[in-house]
Image (cartoon, rainbow, N blue to C red):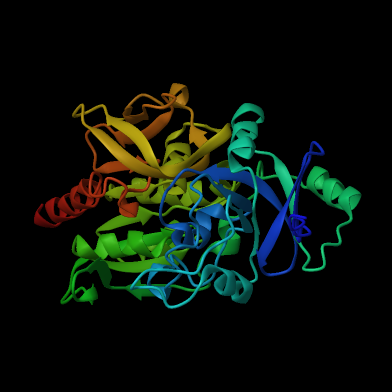
Amino acid sequence: MPNAAPRPTACLALADGTLFFGQGFGAAGETVAELVFNTAMTGYQEIMTDPSYAGQVVTFTFPHIGNVGVTPEDDETVEPVAAGMVVKWDPTEPSNWRSVGNLHDWMTRKGRIGIGGIDTRRLTRAIRQQGAPHVALAHDPDGNFDIEALVARARSWKGLVGLDLAKDVTCAQSYKWDEMRWAWPEGYKRLEGPGLRVVAIDYGAKRNILRCLASAGCEVTVLPATATAEDVLALNPEGVFLSNGPGDPAATGEYAVPMIQGVLAKDLPVFGICLGHQMLALALGARTVKMNHGHHGANHPVKDLTTGKVEITSMNHGFTVDSQTLPAGVSETHVSLFDGSNCGIAVDGKPVFSVQYHPEASPGPQDSYYLFDRFAAALRARRAA
């Protein structure tokens, strides 16, 4: 007789009652979150440690997750933030010269739940058609699950709308950053000498964004998400950067918008990414809306309306700026070629701009690095003036 299928040790329960059973890996336990899918072929460790994924379980459409192992150099923050992961095939033993461990052990140490053996194509189609669902993910090595309780937990979860998660993932206190982008063969180098003074507001900042700022010649001071305009201006910055982050931008905007408006009143250059883009739009008078299933992946084409250039970008957002609400004096600069949603804005005649995508994530791989250079050029021009 053929060997019987192994007993499931993990269960993914959707709020509509749909169940997926598979093999658990990583930590045992339960978690509830919003379920999204990511189409990137690489970067699962960066995705799990990206603060923008707070409150979300990530389904990876690419099946070979775990095959290059893990390395501390690829962490975007100190600890993983995504609640869990869903994969097609169970993670394999790593094969990569940079690997210092395997994904299963890393997930176990970090307290994150994984489930393998799932029909991720079916799951992705469901997310696209019905929207990002609320789910409960459970891992029990003995395979014992209270199905009714899991479905009930998924149904009772309130979701991300109206939820401010930036306060949960921001830094506890200010700090300096001078580490630059990774380069062969030295690895991560440090910015030498004084640079352009930039205050970065941490709504859930990825390390590689800060590295890109340093590589552009910026001497970065990072402040918590709740910093006021007075806190920012007290550091005498030559420009302000607004970082990526999770949650509902309208909720975070309750305290972020007054700070940004205070900075804009001083005519400082401002550059925002992802949630920082949405925060800038709110501060200028626009509105944001929840998307059906969001944009999550490293293959999203975006058109720069100012140049006609098309960039291949990395994205991770479930909310978007409603371009129809942009006020006079604010132009739409970038749009998604997938669905036409807004991907960039700029204040007419001022060095104030932002993009919805992640130029630091190297999907192109260098299609969008010019944005950091544009910001640095604005800082130099202000200094020269």
Is residue 266 visible from the viewing direction of this image?
Answer: no
In the image, taking residue 344 as reference, residue 297 lies left or right, namely: right
Residue found at the very far front of the displayed protein: 1
Residue found at x 47% / y 43%: 39
Q: Pinpoint residue 273: horizontal percent, then vertical percent.
A: 38, 48
Which of 297/93 is in front? 93
Q: Is residue 319 above or below residue 143?
A: above
383 lies above or below 314: below
Q: Position of residue 346 (x, y in %)?
A: 30, 35
Please give the name of the residue rendered at 50% of the width and 57% of the height, measured from the top-left corner.
65
Towards the viewer: 6 or 166: 6
- Say if residue 63 shows up in the picture: yes
Q: Is residue 86 left or right of residue 185?
A: right
Task: Decide which of 117, 206 is in the foreground and name it.
Answer: 117
Q: Up-down: is 74 above or below 157?
A: below
Q: Eyeballing the image, is 28 above or below 239?
A: below
Location of the N terminus by quadrant is: bottom right
Where residue 18 sits in the image (x, y, percent)?
78, 39
